[in-house]
Image (cartoon, helix red, strand yellow):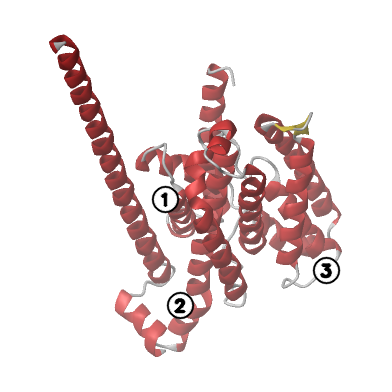
Amino acid sequence: MNNIKDKTLQGTQTGSKTTERIFRGSKKRRARWKLVSFFLALAVVVLCLLTLTVGNTFYSLPEVFRVLTAGGGTDAMRFTILTLRLPRMICGLLAGLSFGVAGYLFQTILRNPLASPDIIGISSATSTAAVFCLLILNLPNSVVPAIAVLTGLLVTLLIYLLSVTNGAFSQSRMILIGIGVQAIANAFTNYLLSRAAEYDTAATLQWLSGSLSGSTMEKVPVFAVCSGVLFVVVALLRHQLPVILLGDAFATGLGVNLRKMYPALLASGVILTATATAITGPIASVAFLAGPIASGIAGRGQNNLLPSGLMGAVLVLGADLVGQNLLPARYPVGVITGLLGAPYLILILLRLGAKGR
C-alpha cells in the first residue's frame, strides 16, 4: 500500500514538474516573440525615417518634422519630402506589410514554405491583368487596382477548384497548379509587352520589376483603406492560424470551421497581394521570405502574423534604400528583393527534395 502511495506521489510530482516546464517554456517563447516584434517595429520606424531623410539631398530629422508638421522649409525641400519621399515611404510600408501578411497566410494555410502568392501564380496573374488594362485597354490608373484584385480572386478560385480531387482539397496540388499558372501568366505578359508601343513599355517594365518610384499621394488613401480593413479582418481571425498548422483533422476536432475559415483567409491574402501589386508592382520574394525569416527569429509553432508583416516592411523599405542609395546605379526594390529570394528558393527546394517532399 505504501509503495502505491509512493508511486502515486512520484507521478504527481513528475507531472507537476512537466507542467511547470511547459509553462516556463511557453513564457520564454512569448517573451521572445514580444522582443522580436518590438525590434522589428523599431527597425520599420528607423527605415521610414531614413526614407524621408536620405537621398540625393540629405535632410535632418528636425527639417523633415518641420516640413511635415508646420509646412516649413524651402519649396524644394517641401517638394522632395511631401511629393517624392513621403508617398514612397507610405506605399513601401503598406506594400511590405501586405506582402508579409499575405505570404504568411498562404504558407500557414497550405502548410508549405513554397506556398507564397508570388510562387503560386497570384502575383503574376494580377500583374498580367494590370498590364493588359494599361497597354491594351488604356484604362485609367484609378480603375486598374480594382480589376487586378478581381483577377487575383478569380485566378485563386480557379486554382482552388482545380486542386480539388474526389472531393478532397490537396495543398501540394494547388502549389503545382499555381506554378503552372504563374508560367502561363508570365508568358502572356511577355507577349503583351512585345506587342505594345515602345514608349509604353519602359514605365510598364519598371512597374513589373516592383518599384516604388511611381508612388503618389493620390494612391495612398485607397491603398491605406483597403489594407487597413483587411489587416483588421485578418487580426480577428488570427487565433485560428496556430490551430490550422496542426492539420485539418485536429483543427476540425477543436471546432474550427475550415469551410468558412479557408476561404476567408485565402480571400484576405489574395486581396492584400493584388492591391499591393497593383500599386507597387510585383515586388519579388517579399511574401516568400517574410514569413520564414520572421518565424525563424521569433520562434515557430506560434502565431507569427505580426512579425511576418513587419519583416515584409523591413525587406521592402530596406531594399529600396539599398537600391536607391548604396549601389552605383539606381535599381527598383523588386530587383534587390529578387536577389535575396533566389538563393532561399534554391535552399528550400534542396531541403524539400532531401525530405522526399
Residue drawn where x is 55% and y is 42% of the image: 255
Cα–Cα span, label 2 and label 3: 31 Å
Q: Earlier in the sequence, mark 2 or mark 3?
A: 2
**Residue 72 visible somewhere in the drawing:** no
Cα–Cα span, label 2 and label 1: 28 Å
- Foreground pick, 132 / 270: 270
Q: Quadrant of the C terminus?
A: top right
Q: Position of residue 180 (x, y in %)?
A: 75, 36
Q: Quadrant of residue 353?
A: top right
Mark 2 crowd level (few <14, some 14–19, many ≥20, 10 Å Cα): many
Q: Earlier in the sequence, mark 2 or mark 1?
A: 2
The amino acid on which the numbered mark 1 sits, given as a three-letter code, is: Pro
**Number of labelled discs?**
3
Q: Position of residue 145 (x, y in %)?
A: 70, 65
Residue drawn where x is 58% and y is 41% of the image: 109
Q: Secondary structure at mark 2?
A: helix
Q: Position of residue 292 (x, y in %)?
A: 47, 39
Q: Position of residue 110 (x, y in %)?
A: 60, 37
- Foreground pick, 201 / 269: 269
Q: Secondary structure at mark 3?
A: loop
Residue named by callout 1? 307
Left or right of 215 on screen, residue 184: right
Q: Quadrant of residue 150?
A: bottom right
Q: Nearer the viewer, mark 3 or mark 1?
A: 1
The amino acid on which the numbered mark 3 sits, given as a three-letter code, is: Asn
Residue 138's tag is: 3
Q: Do labels 3 and 1 touch, CB within 8 Å?
A: no
Residue named by callout 2? 81
Cα–Cα span, label 3 and label 1: 39 Å
